[in-house]
Amino acid sequence: MTRLEALIAALATLTGARLRVWRRQPPDDGVRLLAGRAPRRGWHPALPARAAARTLKTPEGSARFAPVPGVAGAWLEARVRGRRTIDAAAVAREVAGVFEAEEETPLVAAELSVR
């Protein structure tokens, strides 16, 4: 299990939401699931090019999608049951921290190996 998968599982437990992290892959803009339970029938969202939170339809119902700050093409999907709400943008900010840590780890390791 990756750090991102572990974080998504923990945040899903804390928020009571179904969470997934998706990423648009250039150059053809294919969409890949990075973390969270895979949807049925190979579905993937039509992620917008413009980074602004929005509600999109999914096979399981409506879900809130928020861009992950500082991570090109990454989106958090958050779906709650009933009348509950979730601040998907706030959760996406936490997810951004894992991406940042993943990028910094090799840099720190390379710097330490030179010493």
Image (cartoon, rainbow, N blue to C red):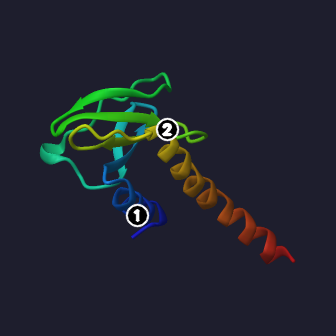
Quarter of the rendering containing residue 14: bottom left
Q: In the drawing, what numbered circle is on residue 78?
A: none
Question: Residue beneath label 1, please?
Answer: 10
Separation of marks 2 and 1 at Cα, in angstroms: 17 Å
Residue 74 visible:
no
Residue 15 visible:
yes
Mark 1 Cα-neighbour bin, 10 Å: few <14, some 14–19, many ≥20: few
Question: Among all residues in the image, which is located at the extreme top?
Answer: 50
Closer to us: 48 or 7: 7
Question: Residue beneath label 2, please?
Answer: 89
Measured from the top left, where is residue 41 in percent x and y? 12, 44
Q: In which quarter of the image is the C terminus?
A: bottom right
Query: Which residue type does callout 2 highlight?
Result: Ala
Number of marks drawn: 2
Q: Quadrant of the N terminus?
A: bottom left
Residue at x 31% of width, y 50% of height: 17
Query: Which residue type does callout 1 highlight?
Result: Ala
Measured from the top left, where is residue 46 in percent x and y? 31, 28
Mark 2 Cα-neighbour bin, 10 Å: few <14, some 14–19, many ≥20: many
Callout 1: SS: helix
Residue at x 35% of width, y 41% of height: 77
Callout 2: SS: helix
Measured from the top left, where is residue 5 in percent x and y? 40, 62
Whether label 2 touches label 1, CB < 8 Å? no
Closer to us: 76 or 90: 90
Residue at x 35% of width, y 56% of height: 12
